[in-house]
Amino acid sequence: MNPSVPSALTALVRRLRHLEIRIRKAVEAQLQGDFHSVFKGTGLEADDVRLYQYGDEVRAIDWAVSSKGHGTFVKTYREEKEQQVLVVLDVSGSLDVSDGQRRKLDVGRDIAGLLALSAARQGSALGLFAFSDQKEMYLPPGKGPRAAYALIQRLFALEPVSRRTGVGAGIKQALGLLKRRTLVVLISDFIDGSYERELTMLAQRHDLIVVQLLAPRERDFPALGIIPLRDSETGQLRWVNTSSAGFRAQVQATADAQEAQLVNICRRTRTGFVALSTEGDFVPQLVNLFRHRQQSGRRG
């Protein structure tokens, strides 16, 4: 490493290389090399037009071309061979919650890093949109190792301006950035109640994978007696009896309801979904999701 490179950057590059080696070993040893399927299309994209023939579906008609008066034309499609990838990452304050060692945000960053490094090896274009209740950072899709390392360096250096969550608003902004069909990997804890409409729209227009980040203490809060709890987004402080059965039941019920809402939306829109905890190794679960996505051949 060049001695003129700042020590913080040196440490980051070493960490990224270690992450890349760990991912490659997991893919090759545990997962039989199927990780390349992440970046292959599972849908159809418009390719050309041809004259309408008896039996063609009305919904396939290209009305813009047909309106020119030269006949009725229908769209033809081809199999997507490679997709542009956009990681949409929630970086709001609620992702600071941890299991004592790793925060949800740390897991989210690692997933983004995994995808960036893997996309570089596959020659695929990958970008990043980070949000809170506003746009925090957008990096357009780029190819190659240099783009991957630049993306991860900027992501790990990011200090969000806002700590509040706006999942629906974040999805809406991401939709505005996408000009062609894209594989979107949406990563959040989804501790926000108003995102169903935007998530459904995203699933309809693009190839979507949803990753929910979980911290064990959000579902099974430790019994610590009466303690002050600070809201990670608003900063509001309140005293609660964490040993109370009512408090613990409420915490679990809230977490269950949030996950059930998300699972139901993903099931209804046939969207790939995985819940990842701050505990344990997320790589096998994530890659198995991608493998299932490839085998099921989701069609858009």
Image (spheres, rainbow, N blue to C red):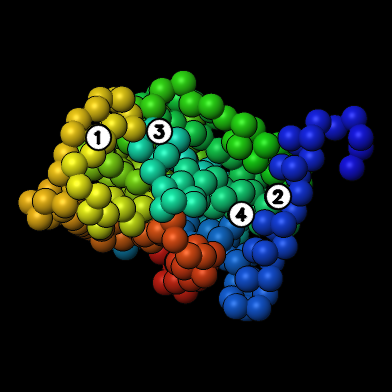
Give the residue drawn at x 51%, y 40%: 180
What amino acid is labelled 4 in the image?
Leu
Looking at the image, is 224 positioned above or below residue 146?
Answer: below
Task: Please state the horizontal and vertical placement of residue 254, each as a whole percent of the image.
Answer: 17, 49
Q: CA distance from mark 4 to mark 3?
A: 21 Å
Ranked by sequence position, the earlier of labels 3 and 1 is 3
Task: Please state the horizontal and vertical placement of residue 253, each as a whole percent of the image.
Answer: 14, 54
Q: Which residue is mark 1?
A: 228
Per the image, label 2 sits on a secondary structure element best described as helix
Ranked by sequence position, the earlier of labels 1 and 2 is 2
* Residue extending furthest toward the left: 246
Task: Give whichever of 84, 136 is nearer the camera.
Answer: 136
Quadrant holding the N terminus: top right
Task: Give whichever of 46, 147 is nearer the camera.
Answer: 147
Mark 4 crowd level (few <14, some 14–19, many ≥20, 10 Å Cα): many
Would residue 264 be visible to someone looking at this image? yes
Give the residue drawn at x 67%, y 64%: 22
Per the image, label 4 sits on a secondary structure element best described as helix
Ranked by sequence position, the earlier of labels 1 and 4 is 4
Q: Which residue is mark 3?
A: 92
CB of mark 2 within 8 Å of CB of mark 3? no
Quadrant holding the C terminus: bottom left
Q: CA distance from mark 1 to mark 4?
A: 36 Å
Q: Which mark is residue 15?
A: 2
What amino acid is labelled 3 in the image?
Ser
Task: Please state the horizontal and vertical placement of residue 244, each as a whole percent of the image.
Answer: 11, 51
Per the image, label 1 sits on a secondary structure element best described as strand
Task: State left or right for residue 34 relative to residue 98.
Answer: right
